[in-house]
Image (spheres, grey):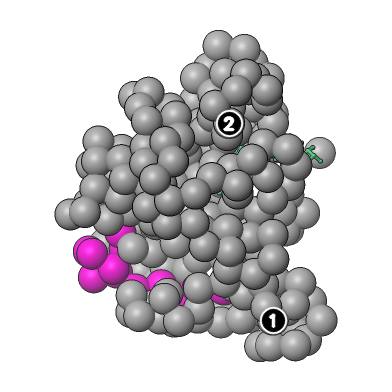
Amino acid sequence: MLITDAVVINQEEIIPGFFRMTMSAGEVAKNARPGQFLHVRCADALDPLLRRPVSIHAVDREKGEVALFYRVAGRGTALLAAREKGDRINILGPLGRGFTRPESSGKVSVAAGGIGIAPLYFLLQELSLINTYANVFLGAATKKQLFFSSEIEALGHSVFPATDDGTAGYHGTVVELFTQNLSDTVYGCGPAGMLKSLCRILEQYKIRGEVSLEERMGCGVGACLSCACKTVSAGENYRYSRVCVEGPVFPAGEVVWA
Ligand SMILES: Cc1cc2nc3c(=O)[nH]c(=O)nc-3n(C[C@H](O)[C@H](O)[C@H](O)COP(=O)(O)OP(=O)(O)OC[C@H]3O[C@@H](n4cnc5c(N)ncnc54)[C@H](O)[C@@H]3O)c2cc1C
Ligand code: FES
């Protein structure tokens, strides 16, 4: 873990309100693992005081570059979106526990809901480096929010889109589409409702899965307990895990959904 000033190389608004920002951050690029996140100081001023957690979206180790893909949700992310090429951004990370590698054989899938593709894209980059190609179930409210289909296909993976309004691909949810194309391992990220129904399917069909969770965070390093979520592991009692340290990626069967 490292506190450093990254330099913005590029800030691109992919569709209104959704930005991909590339930064020069050599040490982070070298050490980052898919599923980890950065705790980002969105402004130079003390307001907002708290950093904001954002997943590591893509890494170019040769160039020492790291990309974030984020939605403007409030004040912190709006300030982040105002950063320009050449600006310095203070980041803490890489933080948290990421995705584990799939077994060497078996079919691998990725299920992403909307902005949930953010950390999964980095996972897909790493999977293609080990010649593991996934079925990628990309879900969104509507066609224009199906992000990075062509980049994902360029990595060698197969994309299966699903939209709530039927404007592209399967007309329905990404979990319904995955259920029609089950695999041995699945990695998921997206809204809580989507992950809850994905975990239910994984339990029903005894499929190995990991999901990346989001909770509001304070410190990002395990000290303040603001990010606790209820978990359970086989044969144990319920407990509270810190999403920033024990997560954000959890085995699907360990998450206790409300
Ligand atoms: C591990 C982790 C990784 C994340 N990765 C990404 C990412 O790659 N891209 C991305 O767009 N967002 C990501 N998020 C969510 C992002 O951190 C929040 O959108 C951001 O902190 C909002 O800050 P804000 O100041 O803009 O909005 P605020 O004014 O703080 O909040 C605006 C709205 O967003 C909600 N919100 C704030 N923080 C969270 C949170 N952590 N989870 C869910 N809802 C929240 C608030 O309840 C409120 O409704 C991640 C969150 C976590 C915990
Ligand atoms: S954010 Fe402080 S313990 Fe997780």
- Residue nearest the viewer, comparing 1 with 163: 1
The disc label shown at residue 43, or none: 2
Q: Residues within 10 Å of mark 2 (few under 14, many from 20)?
A: many
Give the amino acid at mark 2: Ala
Which residues make up the magenta segment?
126-137
Q: Quadrant of residue 184?
A: bottom left
Rendered view: 133 above or below 64:
below
Q: Secondary structure at mark 1?
A: helix
- Residue nearest the viewer, comparing 101 with 163: 163
Q: Residue at x 66, y 88 (%)?
A: 169
The disc label shown at residue 143, or none: 1
Residue 136 forms part of the magenta stretch: yes
Asked whether residue 150 is in view, the answer is yes
Give the position of the N terminus as an image quadrant: top left
Q: Residue furthest left?
A: 62
The disc label shown at residue 88, or none: none
